[in-house]
Amino acid sequence: MAALAYTLGKREINHYFSVRSAKTLALGAVLLLAVCHAASRRYRGDDTCEYLISSGRFLGEKVWQPHSCMMHKYKNSEAKNCLIDKYIAFVGDSRIRQLFYSFVKLINPQVKEEGNKHGNVPFEDTSASIKVDFLWYPEVNGSMRQRIKTWTEGSAAKPHIIVAGAATWSIKIHNGSNEALAQYKVNITSIAPLLEKLAKSSDVYWVLQDPVYEDLLSESRKMITNKKIDAFNEVAVRILNSSSRNSKDKVKMFSVSKLIAQETIMKSSDGLHLPESSREMNAMILMNVWCNKIMKPIDGSCCQPQPPFTLIQKLAFFFFTLSIIGYLILNLIHRNNHRKNKPCTDLESGEEKKPAINIPISTLELLLQSFCKLGLIMAYFYLCDRANLFMKENKFYTHSFFFIPIIYILVLGVFYTENTKETKVLNREQTDEWKGWMQLVILIYHISGASTFLPVYMHIRVLVAAYLFQTGYGHFSYFWIKGDFGVYRVFQVLFRLNFLVMVLCIVMDRPYQFYYFVPLVTVWFMIIYVTLVVWPQIVQKKANGNCFWHFGLLLKLICLLMCIYFLSYSQGAFEKIFSLWPLSKCFELNGNVYEWWFRWKLDRYVVFHGMLFAFIYLALQKRQVLSEGKGEPLFSNRVSNVLLFISVVSFLTYSIWASSCKNKTECNELHPSVSVVQILAFILIRNIPGYIRSVYSSFFAWFGKISLELFICQYHIWLAADTKGILVLIPGYPMLNIIVSTFIFVCVAHEISQITNDLAQIVIPKDNATLLKRSESNASFYSLYYESPNKVKLKGIALQIRNGR
């Protein structure tokens, strides 16, 4: 009964929810969300700077998330480069002084909080010509007004950034009287025109007063209550925003500090001043407000304008537009012809004439249809990760955010367990399943920000290595068994691997090496091909006639291993090879190939291990050493039990070692040599017991068939800011947002997989002469693309990728 209910349940799900209906639903969701976000931007405005300094929430104790955008964590060197030749002034009381010190420490962490607490504090960095002053004006009064007036009318150097604020001293000195509030209103009214005049040439921020923790206040500060602070803040907001509400050059209200203080003031040492972590957040927000538009960090979307279109992007837009128009015209002609051929009733006999035979879709129509769909999908990519239509948020790792989804997909995978069509080791269904669950785990790893947790990072590195292991195993097996070294096969593989990435390089204005995994599998495929195609070409058919050829192939593999070993320890030789034109155009980032060398070196042996495993397995299979019947153990019971025990111990031993890693650099050094241990252990555990080898998860296998598209698409339509953040389609509801964005993301990846397959049949002809001509034209196009002076090369891309390893 349980098995029957299980089968019926799957049939019901598959009957009512097809891939086609899912894609239709995803398209409707995208259109609806785009309209809602566009309307929201128009109504609320699209100034992310305003959101940065006025709204947000805590993701963790020390992680602040601004509303709708991402905040970059600036390093000292970045802060100096941004603020070079700048003058910043902090004007106010002791709270502003603390903010001043936190800001200065972003430039120079060695600065000490010392000196006269009730006096001016200067700071200067001569190496970058940066000047930051704290000016002691604890009350909004005539003295503060005179200082501001000297900047507007006098000859004194005018600051580029002014951060001001005061009120608690007025409350304290006047014992919280109503007269103090009235005088504060008069005084701030007198300085408002001066601040607005300054705002025309400088960035002026008025810091609203943070709440206090009244239980910790000393007796001399008991009159400073949150009710009084709210009243003073209300006066400041009403007056400073009254005359310049709709003006671009206005005094900006820095109210985010108040939101941060509401969550952290109870950790204050005296109930009045913020804890250090909160002050650092405020300083980092100020740095993002000014520097993001200058430094343009990938993970700092707040205050960044939409990047201008490059020439190549404009040409791509024009091409896709023409494709859509062409397809619509052809489709219209096709429908009109269909209506003319529609069966009609014979008036005399009353019988229907036989319908005309349906004409299959032409190659041109299929080509235009594919480019039409691809153009619409690329528009969605651009809107998600280049335009400022949808929101973005920073990642924040928690164990539950990573492990709970893992458990969830494991349950789904078990629910969709079916019998395999064949029971060979690493059969197609099993490898698709393997790719599928690995890809889902990697996706969860990326969106959860789990790279900060070293044990998870080391296990994910094994999954990436396992993909490359399958590359070695799969391509070696094909060439060894089929003996097909024709250029048609080569170009088919290269097209399927690289088509989507090449389109994204154009549409998203990113270098080829940015999508590092595709260059990695592409290069390894070519290495496998060259290794086997060079003289003497040794294939299974030839080797079966003479065992000598097996030794010849082993000699080839040994030569390959020696080359890999040499290049991995000779960075200079590696860089010379890949710095040659045209390879340099594909593999350089920021003018060098170091990043590519690092990526290649990290899993340098695992493809060789996959090739060697395929050779040994196929040799054992040919000699009928293995029992691959349904339900049969792979070896004799005794041997199977021993190997299974060794595999389980090896698998767990590696996991224990990976979980005990303390240093990422040291563990990465060992990873290339030891990752194969867990990979081989998994293969044996999965294949030795016959009953496990005879079943597979169709759920995981479905995802495995589109694993490459999932890996690439996540960069821009599931994650955001080139994987540094998370795409937010439904703000305020994190779980619902993940569900909806994931659903759309998977549908898009599946559609792109089908488009790639359709185009591969059209673009890659079987005629070698035609194929070579097309490849020459494509090579010429991409040569022009990479040489184009209009192509924007962002210098920070290499650094951002390196930081996220």
Image (spheres, rainbow, N blue to C red):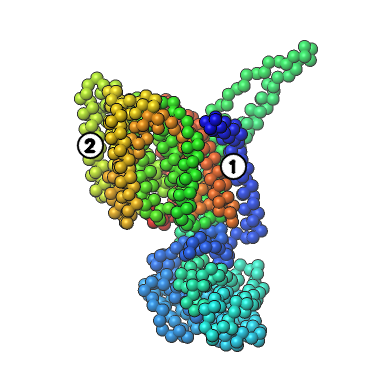
Q: To which residue does mark 1 refer?
A: 26
Which percent across, then down, holds residue 694? 41, 29
Helix, strand or loop status at disc 2: helix
Which quarter of the image is occupied by the N terminus?
A: top right
Residue found at x 25% / y 34%: 557
Residue found at x 20% / y 25%: 548
Picture layout, residue 449 above or below residue 630: below
Q: CA distance from mark 2 to mark 1?
A: 50 Å
Q: Is residue 512 left or right of residue 605?
A: right
Amino acid on which disc 1 is placed: Ala
Residue found at x 54% / y 49%: 738
Which percent across, then down, holds residue 654? 31, 46
Helix, strand or loop status at disc 1: helix
Using the image as rendered, state which of residue 730 and residue 434 is in the foreground.
Answer: 434
- In the rendered structure, find residue 52 and report the number of the disc placed on it: none
Picture layout, residue 666 above or below residue 139: above
Using the image as rendered, state which of residue 477 and residue 737 is in the foreground.
Answer: 737
| Crowding near the residue tagged with mark 1, few <14, some 14–19, many ≥20 C-alpha atoms within 10 Å | many
Picture layout, residue 487 above or below residue 247: above
Residue 501 visible within the image: no
| Crowding near the residue tagged with mark 2, few <14, some 14–19, many ≥20 C-alpha atoms within 10 Å | few
Q: To which residue does mark 2 refer?
A: 559
